Image: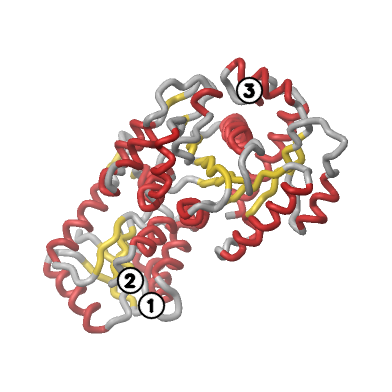
């Protein structure tokens, strides 16, 4: 039986050429003229693979991909984006919504056939004859953690959220520290080799392969897979490698159910590019006037990046006991943004965890602060379920 291709292409001449070329190669092609027709054709034809043009009237290829990936019945279909767009941002957007491969127009029929065959080869029968989907065909839930300025506990929040997700969901979790030259996870969690991120960023974009990223992850005894950043001050310059960061996050997203990114502080160029790739964004602050004012500005700038405020969670991290700290209700009022969780000051709690070189909620799972973290983890799990 011939492989069935669903082609979504609104340009009549190009659609006819692609259809005829692929049929001459032995494929059966169902041609839809727009996104809505493509979704209807999928229900009727149940194709083996989809080739989607990006720019279409009514519904573009990105939205078609989102809908196919959202539906469990269609989530595993191989999808090839086929478009005239060549900008990296467009390619990243395609991968973000779940595309498996990307070709730019014009392309030779032999090249298109090769890509189609490669995508179909990713599906292989297992011992029971069922179809197994490779990691590239599923995308994990990405959570970015950041603050308006340094020293507010972003790394602590990121590592404990990651550990909480691993505990609660019993799932693979990657914790990636995206702050070259300013790493702290290596020291906090007893990881000696912290060169992985720097090596990934120092190479070319083409060198950021799935295999390279996977081999750079270090398994911690807390059950997390960790990509720590180096603490070599010279590596700070690597923060300019924006394209490498983008590809890295998309690679990480295929390796675990949850990916927690420690994005550090502020909105450097690479963070502005990575935030749209995140499903959840977590902003950390403390209950002090300067921190509140800085965070208001950060939230405003994140809105300017067209990030949905509903995907931004705020964690009030009161690290030290002080009468000068503002109560969470007043902080929330001043921010004009809901606070998802307020962490009780517990410096001894984090100090003990640092000595044990493990996330704090692993060191003292029954403590009040651990329970507050787990409450926030449950919020993230609800967000994942909703999305």
Label 1 vs label 3, nearer the camera: 3
Task: Give residue 158's position: percent from left, percent from top.
Answer: 59, 37
Left/right placement of residue 80 relative to residue 181 reads left
Task: Give residue 335's position: percent from left, percent from top.
Answer: 76, 55
- Contact check, label 1 and label 2, Cβ < 8 Å: yes
Q: How far apart, in angstroms, are the residues tagged by discs 1 and 2?
A: 7 Å
**Residue at the right extreme, as displayed:** 323
**Residue at the front extreme, as displayed:** 234
> Which residue lies under the disc numbered 1?
56
x 34%, y 44%: residue = 131
The first of marks 1 and 3 along the sequence is 1
Left/right placement of residue 380 relative to residue 178 reads right
**Residue at the top extreme, as displayed:** 356
> Which residue lies under the disc numbered 2?
53
Numbered disc 1: secondary structure = loop
- Contact check, label 2 and label 3, Cβ < 8 Å: no
Between 246 and 119, the one lying in front of the other is 246
Label 1 packing within 10 angstroms: few (<14), some (14-19), many (20+): some
């Amino acid at each position: 039986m011939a492989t069935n291709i669903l082609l979504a292409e609104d340009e009549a001449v190009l659609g006819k050429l692609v259809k005829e070329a692929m049929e001459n190669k032995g494929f059966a092609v169902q041609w839809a003229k727009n996104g809505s027709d493509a979704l209807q054709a999928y229900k009727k034809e149940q194709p083996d693979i989809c080739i989607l043009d990006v720019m279409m009237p009514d519904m573009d290829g990105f939205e078609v991909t989102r809908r196919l990936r959202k539906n469990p019945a269609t989530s595993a279909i191989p999808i090839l984006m086929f478009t005239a767009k060549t900008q990296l941002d467009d390619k990243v957007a395609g991968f973000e919504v779940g595309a498996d491969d990307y070709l730019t127009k014009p392309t030779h029929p032999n090249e298109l056939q090769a890509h189609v065959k490669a995508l179909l080869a990713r599906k292989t029968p297992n011992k029971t004859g069922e179809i197994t989907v490779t990691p590239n065909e599923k995308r994990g839930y990405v959570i970015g953690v950041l603050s308006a300025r340094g020293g507010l506990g972003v790394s602590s929040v990121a590592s404990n959220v990651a550990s909480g997700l691993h505990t609660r969901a019993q799932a693979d979790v990657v914790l990636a520290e995206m702050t070259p030259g300013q790493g702290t996870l290596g020291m906090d969690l007893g990881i000696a080799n912290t060169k992985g991120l720097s090596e990934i960023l120092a190479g070319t974009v083409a060198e950021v392969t799935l295999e390279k990223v996977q081999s750079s992850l270090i398994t911690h005894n807390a059950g997390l897979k960790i990509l720590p950043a180096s603490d070599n001050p010279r590596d700070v310059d690597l923060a300019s490698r924006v394209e490498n960061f983008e590809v890295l996050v998309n690679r990480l997203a295929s390796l675990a159910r949850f990916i927690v990114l420690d994005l550090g502080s502020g909105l450097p160029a690479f963070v502005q590019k990575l935030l749209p790739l995140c499903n959840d964004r977590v902003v950390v602050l403390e209950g002090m006037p300067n921190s509140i004012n800085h965070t208001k500005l950060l939230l405003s700038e994140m809105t300017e990046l067209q990030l949905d405020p509903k995907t931004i969670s705020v964690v009030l991290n009161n690290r030290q006991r002080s009468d000068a700290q503002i109560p969470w209700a007043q902080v929330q009022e001043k921010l004009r943004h809901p606070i998802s969780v307020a962490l009780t000051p517990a410096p001894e709690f984090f100090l003990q965890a640092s000595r044990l070189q493990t996330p704090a909620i692993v060191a003292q799972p029954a403590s009040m602060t651990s329970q507050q973290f787990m409450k926030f983890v449950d919020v993230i799990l609800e967000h994942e379920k909703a999305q």
